[in-house]
Image (spheres, grey):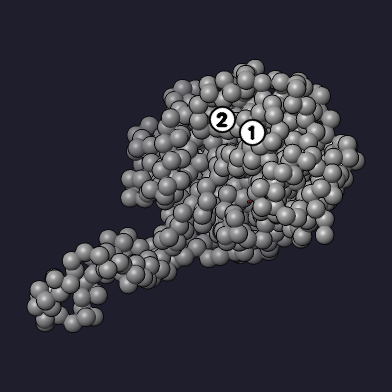
Amino acid sequence: MTTFEGLGIDARLIQATDELGYVNPTPIQEQAIPVLLSGTKDFIGLAQTGTGKTAAFGLPLLHIIDAAAKHPQALVVCPTRELCLQIVKEIELFKKYIKGVSVVAVYGGTSIGLQIRDLKKGVQIVVATPGRLIDLIERKAINLEQIEYVVLDEADEMLNMGFQDDIEFILKNTPQRESTWLFSATMPPEIRKVSKRYMKDPVEVTVGKVNTANKSIDHQYYVTSAQHRYQTLKRIIDFNPGIYGIIFTRTKVDAQEISERLTREGYDIDALHGDLTQVQRDKVMGQFRDKSLQLLIATDVAARGIDVQGITHVINYELPDDVEVYTHRSGRTGRAGNQGISIAIVHSKEMYKLKQIERINNSKFHKLDIPSGKDVCRKQFFHFMDKLLSADISHGDYETYVPMLAEKFADVSKEEVLKRVAAMEFDRFLKYYENAEDLNVRERGKNEQRDSRGNGRRDGGAYESRRDRGGSNGYSRLFVNLGTKDGFYKASFLQFILDMSDLKKEVLGRIDMKDMNSWVEIEKGAANQMIRALDGKNYKGRRIRMNDADSGGRRPNKRGEA
Ligand code: AMP
């Protein structure tokens, strides 16, 4: 059996590991340590968490670095604050008998000033999360000029959390980097790409089985129309009473607006987006983390790096354009051995995106019907009954009330009591869903099938036929009383009018946005459809006015003033 001595580790390190009770090296240590000590430049270690990876790179680092030189020589980058602290703690234990070596943890969500002070003390090993490290680089508070060793720990998790650009930035900003050691539990294509770009002939070692896709996530989708997206979201939430989830939107306007709307309707939700201050952001994250918030709605940028345990659902309010972004989003669930669900709410015209994701991520989406009002009520009802049955009555003085209760309910049957409890809890809810409409967009006709085979950018059947009918030359110019003051910028405005009208981008011409108003060029054949979809509707409590700009404000098929 191999021993740590046999691996060529410094005696002082062996003394420390002995004291920690390490008798034999774990498989990843046995395979990695001799390679890393041999002067091999680049290394890839594929192993699950908990297999002893920290010692696998920590011991060789401590063996190699120069304790006499008081500048950062090794940089360990890892995805989360918790891991960062854990790595530092272990390295501290390993270096117990080595004099003059310092290690510092650098991570977000805590005072940057103290970390800057620690860095100035002449540390040799920096253990950092990517976001904070970039912050320090940009403030010129850390000098990576002389870093020789870069360790990327849990590289797949870092990419899942949206840190790919940051990692590349870090690798680019370590000009003296001699060795890059990458540890990861899985080997998705993005990691291959990073290793190809920044590593030279790495020695690759695999311990145990390596997955390419995260099999603990169930990918599901619901097909609805643009105007029912919000109702569909609500129904999905209502159908999953125990949900603890993150909803992703493409824009901060959407995140804010949906959050406000759902809050008004009694949901436990808050938004995380770029307009929040760090204090507001920390507050929202704190509430979500300790589960006093059930739902978080976020933009991709704001949600970068979020690491919260136990997330049951990720909901894509709209699918992102980029497959990688979908991977980051869905990677927030199904962590640490738990099962998770990633849901996409899609239009029939977005089917090609699902196929793209399936192809690149090597995963499969399952189509589900949007639950009917009845389904939701049934689910909520049984959830409530389960809660009722599992209520803890071991504390409190309930026993003393039993005789009084028995008297009060003497003439009421058990069934009736249950019905009354249910009525109290559900009356409002049942009424809301009483006449709930079917939100599913059912597949129809050939065009739809062609679409679901994912033929590139083909649109759904309904769009094709509408466009065929359109076909006329020239544009109409529409006036609308929405502008940048309403929180729109061009892309989000475009998305908004297209979603509302169920039209596609190609029918539009020039868009001219001002503070309060905008002008939209649109194919003549599609103009009425857009006016009908927007004119008279509400946006943030204001009535939208849309009309043909060149016909003196007259609106087709509508009553009302100009
Ligand atoms: P890691 O994967 O580095 O987080 O390590 C997982 C756990 O295994 C930690 O608690 C380590 O202290 C422990 N560990 C690492 N290497 C060994 C070893 N060779 N023998 C016994 N325990 C170890």
In the figure, is residue 130 to the left or right of 455?
left
Expressed as whole percent of the image width and height from the top left, the position of residue 178 reads 84, 30
In space, the residues marked 1 and 2 are separated at their CA atoms by: 37 Å
- Against 447, residue 379 (above or below) is below
Looking at the image, is 174 positioned above or below residue 303? above
Q: As shown in the figure, which amino acid type bears the numbered disc 2? A: Lys
Q: Describe the element under mark 1 as helix, strand or loop.
A: strand
Residue 387 visible in the current orientation: yes
Neighbor class of circle 1 (other Cα within 10 Å; few <14, some 14-19, many 20+) is many
Mark closest to the chain's N terminus, 1 or 2: 1
Asked if the residues shown at circle 1 and circle 2 are in contact, with their CB atoms under 8 angstroms apart, the answer is no
Specify the quadrant that holds the N terminus: bottom right
Task: Give coordinates of residue 464: x percent, y percent.
Answer: 66, 52
Instruction: Out of 466 and 181, give the one closest to the viewer.
Output: 181
- Give me the residue at 66% from left, 47% from top: 19
Secondary structure type for disc 2 = helix
- For badge 1, the amino acid type reads Ala
Number of numbered callouts drawn: 2
Is residue 124 shown left or right of residue 495? right
Residue 335 occupies quadrant: bottom right
Depth check: give the residue in front, 476 or 179.
Answer: 179
Q: Nearer the viewer, mark 1 or mark 2?
A: 1
Q: Is residue 441 left or right of residue 534?
A: right
Query: Disc 2 designates what residue?
Result: 490
Residue that badge 1 annotates: 128
Seen as rendered, the residue at the extreme right is 201
* Residue at 62% across, 20% down: 121
Residue under the point 59% across and 55% down: 336
Residue 537 sits in quarter: top left
**In the rendered image, which quarter is residue 259 located in?**
top left
